Image (cartoon, coloured by chain):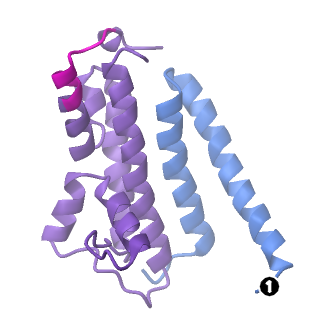
Amino acid sequence: MREATADRAHSASYTYLICVAAWAFPGVGHLLLGRMQKGLTFLITLPLMFAFGLWLEGRLFPINRFDQPLVVLAGLADLGIGVPFFVARALQLGAGRVVALTYEYGNAFLIVAGLMNMLVVLDAFDVAQGRK
Amino acid sequence: MTHASHAGLMIMFALFVSIVFATLMRDDPKEQLFFGGQLFVAFVVGGIALGWILYFFPL
C-alpha cells in the first residue's frame, strides 16, 4: 500500500534535494517523502551492511587511481553509500587487509551496499517525480 | 574476524540484499515479507547449488 503523501510530483529543485539527501544518508530521501517504513528499512539496513563490510576487513577503494579502471569503479561503488563512506575514511577504516580470510567478502559487502544505495536514490527520484 | 564461515557470510549477504530489494520493489509490508523471503531462499539455494556445480569443475 502506498503512503499518500508522495503521490504527487515535486518541483525539480526539491527532487534534486531529495536525491542528494537520499545519497548522503541512506533512506532519508524516502523519509522526507513520507515513506517512513521504506526509509527506516534503508536507514538501518544499508549502513549496517556497510559497517559489516568494514568489520570484515574490506577495503574502501580510491577513486583517483586512473591507471586501474576497475579500482576506480569499485571506489565509485563504495562512494554510493554517501556520508558513511567519508566517516569511515575519517576514522581511517576500510584500509583492507588483503591476507584476511574475509577480505573479498568485505569488499562485496561494501561495494554492494553502495550500489544498492544508488538504486534507493533512483527510487526516491521516481517517488518525488510522482511515478511511483 | 576469525570465526566467519563462508556459508554464514553468504547467508548474511543474501539477507541484506533480500531486505533492500524487497523493500524497493514492493510497497505493502506483507508483500515485502513474502517477496523478501522468496529472494532470500533463491539466493541461498542458488549459492549452494552453484557451489556444488563448481565442486565438479575444479580450477
Q: Quadrant of residue A8?
A: top left
Q: Quadrant of the C terminus of chain A?
A: top left
* Residue B15 visible in the picture: yes
Task: Name the side, left or right, on which B21 lies relative to A62.
Answer: right
Q: Residue furthest front?
A: A67
Q: Please report the bounds of the magenta region as a residue range.
A: A8-16
Q: What SS does tag 1 mark?
A: loop
Give how far across and how far down residue A66 sits, in percent.
Answer: 31, 74
Q: Quadrant of residue B58?
A: bottom right
Residue at 47%, 33% in the rendered image: B24
Compared to B59, does A34 lie above or below? above
What crowding class fits label 1: few (fewer than 14 Cα within 10 Å), some (14-19), or many (20 or more)? few
Query: Chain A appears what colour?
Result: purple
* Residue A56 visible in the picture: no
Q: Is residue B26 magenta?
A: no
**Number of marks drawn:** 1
| Residue closest to the eye, B27 or A121 | A121
Residue at 35%, 8% in the rendered image: A4
Residue at 67%, 39% in the rendered image: B38
Q: Is residue A13 magenta?
A: yes
Task: Name the side, left or right, on which A44 lies relative to B2.
Answer: left
Q: Amino acid at mark 1?
A: Pro
Task: Name the side, left or right, on which A57 lies relative to B31.
Answer: left
Give how far across and how far down residue A114 sits, in percent.
Answer: 37, 54
Tell me which chain the residue with mark 1 is part of. Answer: B
Q: Residue furthest bottom?
A: A99
| Residue closest to the eye, B19 or A86 | A86
Query: Chain B appears what colour?
Result: blue
Compared to A14, does B51 lie above or below? below
Residue position for label 1: B58
Residue at 83%, 80% in the rendered image: B57
